[in-house]
Amino acid sequence: MLALGCDHGGYALMQEVKAHLEQQGIAYLDFGCSSPDSVDYPDYAVKLGKSIQDGCSNLGILICGTGIGISIAANKMTGIRAALCSDCFSAQAAREHNDANVLVMGGRVLGPGLACKIVDTFLQSSFSGDERHVRRIEKITEIEQQEEA
């Protein structure tokens, strides 16, 4: 299941992404926000991240104004590999090389046409499983475990 979350800065673009997903028949869980009124992006990063940690979702999309703040917040969570992407190549590499499980975009940075292409690329790509990439992700996991200790 795909999880979605945004703050007020990402609200308008998220509406475009949701319409795009619905046109394709892709189901999703929507963790908000529910209006363009000001909210705090870490709250939505945590809601989406917990959905992935709990196994309710396997992938997520987060959007804030630039994508920076919400990606920083999401990446503080164990097991979340959130990739801020502004182009299709990065979205594909994030999945194939980094096994990213959250796509992050900037609502004030991208137009809806490109954002939807990035979403498609992210969702259609998968982790390559190549030994060198596995090794690097294992090192990221070790960093998380050391920080938790």
Image (cartoon, rainbow, N blue to C red):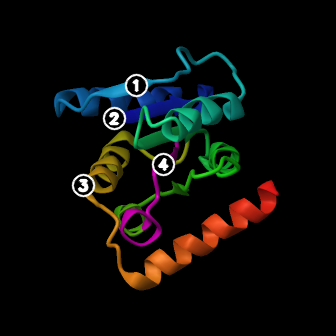
In the structure shown, which secondary structural element does the residue marked by tag 3 occupy?
helix
Residue hosting label 4: 102
Pick the front one: 143 or 33? 143
Tag of residue 29: 1
In the structure shown, which secondary structural element does the residue marked by tag 1 occupy?
strand
The answer to whether 39 is drawn above or below residue 76 in the figure is above
The residue sitting at the front extreme is 149
What is the CA distance from the residue labelled 3 to the residue labelled 4?
13 Å
The answer to whether 122 is drawn above or below residue 16 in the figure is below
In the structure shown, which secondary structural element does the residue marked by tag 4 occupy?
strand
Q: Is residue 10 something that shows in the picture? A: no
Contact (Cβ within 8 Å) of mark 3 with mark 4: no
Residue hosting label 3: 124
Q: Earlier in the sequence, mark 1 or mark 3?
A: 1
Contact (Cβ within 8 Å) of mark 2 with mark 4: no
Residue hosting label 2: 1
